[in-house]
Image (cartoon, rainbow, N blue to C red):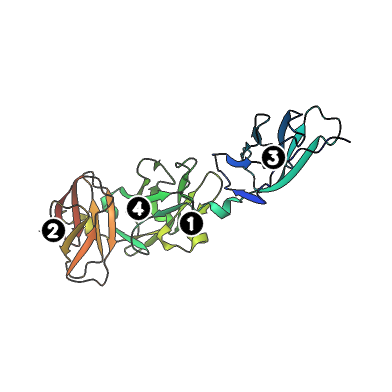
Amino acid sequence: CPNKRPTLGTLPAAISRNFNAITPSEVALSGISDNNGGKFSMTVTAKSSDSSIVPHPVVIYNSPDATGTMQIIGAQPPKSGTVTITVTVTNDTAYCNSKTSKTMQVTVKPEALWFVLPTFSLFPSTMYTKYVDPAMGEQSIVISGITNIGKNNVPDNYRGLSMTASAVSNGAWLTSYTENLTIDTLTGTAEFKFTVSPDAPEGTEIKVNFVLASATGKKTSPTNTSDPKATLTISVKKGIGLEPAVEEQMAVYPNPASEIIYINLPQGTETVEITNVAGVVVKSFDVKGQKGTIALSTAGLASGNYVIRAGKKSASVVIK
């Protein structure tokens, strides 16, 4: 055969893609020629060994250029695995030695490799106990820090995220509670509401587990993360709801505040709560064992008026 085979430069040995990557992976093609002094026009094509994982790539090429671009995308719905991509340069009118092919591998990483389990912080303490007087009626707690950002900072924009709550201990003493929470996609928060039965005995502890799940089935819960932040303990303490809402004023400084506020902690206080104007707890701090003046972070709170409660003392504070 008088013709020489066309040429194609070296391809990368392998590349990898994230499970749900949207942007195409581009591979530069070089060293393309008909190898016969420009006698033939050329076509460049690419094929995948498994189009259910990686569809056949798109090749952008104009003959007789020496370079081109191959674009690789993942299949929809996403599927992980490794495929072989075969790139072929063809001298269109040659009757022999008309093709040259080279291969490379593309690996689509399993979800577990890039997807950080959905996370949320129920409260800043390792485990939160809320003391409730059944006479107070329905209570609410704001869960914050909900996200499903991957380790490469690839957000899913809360798409398909869902949060559920289940009473796993003494749940019979809850007359009602939010089982399917609504996630605020602008703030990454969800509100949990519950009502304790007036017949619940003093000292009863009700435990509620929260599970945050992604659209692709990944979950964060106490059972698979060993993270007690996903558990809320509701402790029945009768009579506290009958006390005046504000018995003593508490000094808070600076006021207005921005990121940090300081309070003189009343003796024996175990929990400090910050509530908004609607009475919803937006931040809670476990201060058991602490004494004297302590600092509290107000980071993440919107500008506005809030009330800080520590034991029987409270104070109004403005966040700017």
The residue wearing badge 2 is 252
**Image x and y of residue 230, in percent:** 42, 58
**Image x and y of residue 259, in percent:** 22, 54
For the point 61% across and 42% down, which residue is it? Answer: 27
Determine contact: label 1, label 2, CB under 8 Å.
no
For marks 2 and 3, give the CA distance.
61 Å
Q: Secondary structure at mark 2?
A: strand
Q: Nearer the viewer, residue 23 or 298?
A: 23
Q: Which kind of residue does numbered mark 1 sit on?
A: Ser
From the viewer's perspective, is 100 left or right of 292?
right
Foreground label between 1 and 4: 1
Q: Which kind of residue does numbered mark 4 sit on?
A: Ser
The residue wearing badge 1 is 221
Q: Which kind of residue does numbered mark 3 sit on?
A: Ser
Q: Residues within 10 Å of mark 3 (few under 14, many from 20)?
A: some
From the viewer's perspective, is 291 left or right of 170?
left
Which is nearer the N-term, disc 2 or disc 3? Answer: 3
| 194 shown above or below 202 | above
For the point 20% across and 62% down, which residue is it? Answer: 311
Q: Secondary structure at mark 4?
A: loop
Q: Secondary structure at mark 3?
A: loop
The residue wearing badge 3 is 52
